[in-house]
Amino acid sequence: MKIAIPNKGRLKDPVIQFLASVGVKGNFSDDRALIIPTNWEGVQLVMVRTEDIPSIVESGAAELGITGHDYVIESNSDIDELIKLDFGKSKIVLAVPVSWNIDKVEEIKDEIRIATKYYNIAKQYLEKKNIKAKIVKISGAAEVMPSLGAADAIIDVMSTGTTLKLHGLKPLDTILESSAVVIANRNWVKSEEADKINLLLTMMKGALMARNKKMIFMNVPDDKLDKVIASLPAMLSPTLSKLAKSEAWEVITVVDEDLIPDVIAKVKANGARDIVVVNIEKVVK
């Protein structure tokens, strides 16, 4: 089974880190290799351009892929988006020079030139907004095109807006919100690799569920148990185990990381002791 992943760019490292959290680790002994074996028997990573991944998955050359939602839309590929990931978040925006002194798309009256690598997304957007424009198709950095005189405005990806600001541009309209996604060929359920794919998807979802969650263990005297349980959040309900030779219980629960200080303060005030907080790798439902 092959998983197509970015060979460079802003998604490469986060994708590799995510797969490692899932348990899939590539043998990157040769950075020039395009097909890399992993610690999962029969699973290989295919290192390709991020924008090519939807087409590669659609063709069946790779059963799964991880790319940006924006590239899925731009490619018009007939694939399934199976999991939305929590990284690679960005926006596709129409950005214009600050010197234009406009705040709305409707204020663009004259025909303009727009530089973009998102030709299909740009074409559909411009038609929808009834903007008269010539699309200048590029493959490199769009933000320099207005200052070079090659275009008047751009349609491009924006994460923080810092790069646009440095080039005298400002976002005028958000066209599309994007993040990294796991995609598959539409026939993956019928493929010979369906069981392996299902297992990998389960592990991916489990790794995502475990993000920013902690497991708390604590010992609670018998007469304090009700108060401690009442102060605990839990995925269903806390796990209780009677301690041997003691009038006390071990209480276990899973808590969002940002709630940890408040939870510890409450349970400690209600009588819990010997509190231990540990990381969680995966939560499989």
Image: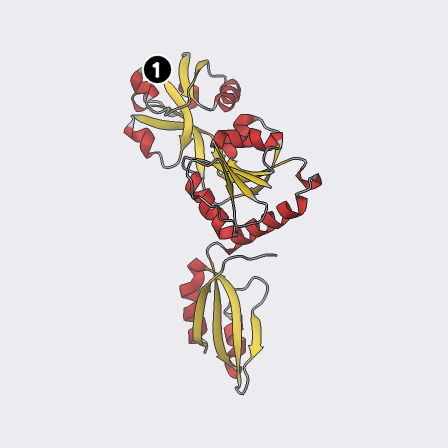
Question: Please, which residue is most extreme toward the top here?
Answer: 111
Question: Please, which residue is most extreme toward the bottom here?
Answer: 245
| Residue in view at x 35 percent, y 15 percent | 150
Tell me, yes or no, if residue 191 can be seen here.
yes
Q: Position of residue 132 (x, y in %)?
A: 46, 13
Question: Please, which residue is most extreme toward the front here?
Answer: 30
Q: Badge 1: how crowded within 10 Å, few (<14), some, or many (20+)?
A: some
Q: Is residue 148 left or right of residue 232?
A: left
Tell me, yes or no, if residue 109 can be seen here.
no
Q: Position of residue 215 (x, y in %)?
A: 49, 65
Residue in front for this viewpoint, 53 or 279:
53
| Residue in view at x 50 percent, y 74 percent | 228
Q: Secondary structure at mark 1?
A: loop
Query: Compared to 189, does 22 lie above or below?
Result: below
Residue in front for this viewpoint, 144 or 92:
144
Question: Please, which residue is most extreme toward the right here?
Answer: 190
| Residue in view at x 30 percent, y 30 percent | 165
On-image quarter of the C terminus: bottom right
| Residue in view at x 50 percent, y 22 percent | 125
Residue in front for this viewpoint, 50 or 246:
50
Q: Is residue 28 left or right of residue 238?
A: left
Q: Which residue is mark 1?
A: 150
On-image quarter of the N terminus: top right
Q: Amino acid at mark 1?
A: Ala
Q: Is residue 120 left or right of residue 63?
A: left
Q: Position of residue 155 (x, y in %)?
A: 42, 24
